[in-house]
Image: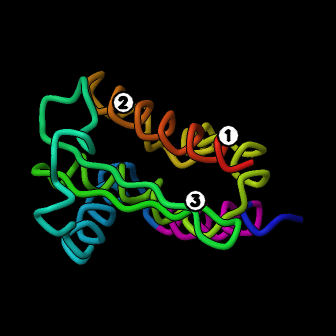
Amino acid sequence: MSSLEEKKLALLDELNLFSDVYERLDYLIDEARDMESLPAERCVEANRIEGCLSNLWFVAEVRSGRCWFLCDADSLVVKSIAGLLCRFYSGATPTEILALDPSFLREAGITEHLSSNRRNALTRVWGRIKACAESAK
């Protein structure tokens, strides 16, 4: 089993500790509050995710054959969802990333309770993560 598969099972177990989706989202928002903010010099237009009502910045790096992701947003809900993806995929190899898309988040009831704009942001962040993995392969 890949390390991302193991992380997926652990994340689903963690999220399923909460009895309903709103408790799960509150938990993710609390996690976002604890996330380190991106430095101002990284919150620039080139790192901004288009198509999101709030400002969402995303940074991808490849080090030693592994992909690393950081994000920040001016909305805690957006930051929580984007941050979930960044934390989940950071440290994985390009092959691992490309083998596991984030559709498993539906199992935890995360995606279907987001507004279309927030789902769009999630899709765009996944697109950037996937593009980083493809270019690093």
Residue 117, magenta (yes or no): no
**Residue 60: image x %, image y %?**
45, 55
Point out the frontmost of discs 2 and 1: 1
What amino acid does circle 3 point to?
Answer: Tyr
Question: Could you tell me how far apart the alpha carbons at marks 3 and 2 are, in whole angstroms?
Answer: 18 Å
Point out the frontmost of discs 3 and 2: 3
**Between discs 2 and 1, the one toward the N terminus:** 2
Question: Could you tell me how far apart the alpha carbons at marks 2 and 1 are, in whole angstroms?
Answer: 22 Å
**Residue 51: image x %, image y %?**
24, 23
In-image side of 135 versus 60 (left or right): right
Which residue position holds label 1? 134
What amino acid does circle 1 point to?
Answer: Glu
Residue shown at 17% from the left, 39% from the top = 45
User: Magenta span: helix, strand or loop, mainly?
Assistant: helix
Tell me the quarter of the picture where residue 2 sits: bottom right
Q: Which residues are magenta?
A: 5-17
Mark 3 lies on a secondary structure that is helix
Mark 1 lies on a secondary structure that is helix
Question: Could you tell me how far apart the alpha carbons at marks 1 and 3 are, in whole angstroms?
Answer: 14 Å
Tell me the quarter of the picture where residue 134 sits: top right
Which residue position holds label 3? 89
Residue 124's mark?
none
**Between discs 3 and 2, the one toward the N terminus:** 3
Mark 2 lies on a secondary structure that is helix
In-image side of 13 versus 125 (left or right): right
Residue shown at 10% from the left, 63% from the top = 40
Which residue position holds label 2? 119
Task: Examine the rendered structure and indicate whether residue 61 appears above or below residue 122.
Answer: below
Mark 2: few, some, or many residues within 10 Å (few <14, many ≥20)? some
For the N terminus, the quadrant is bottom right
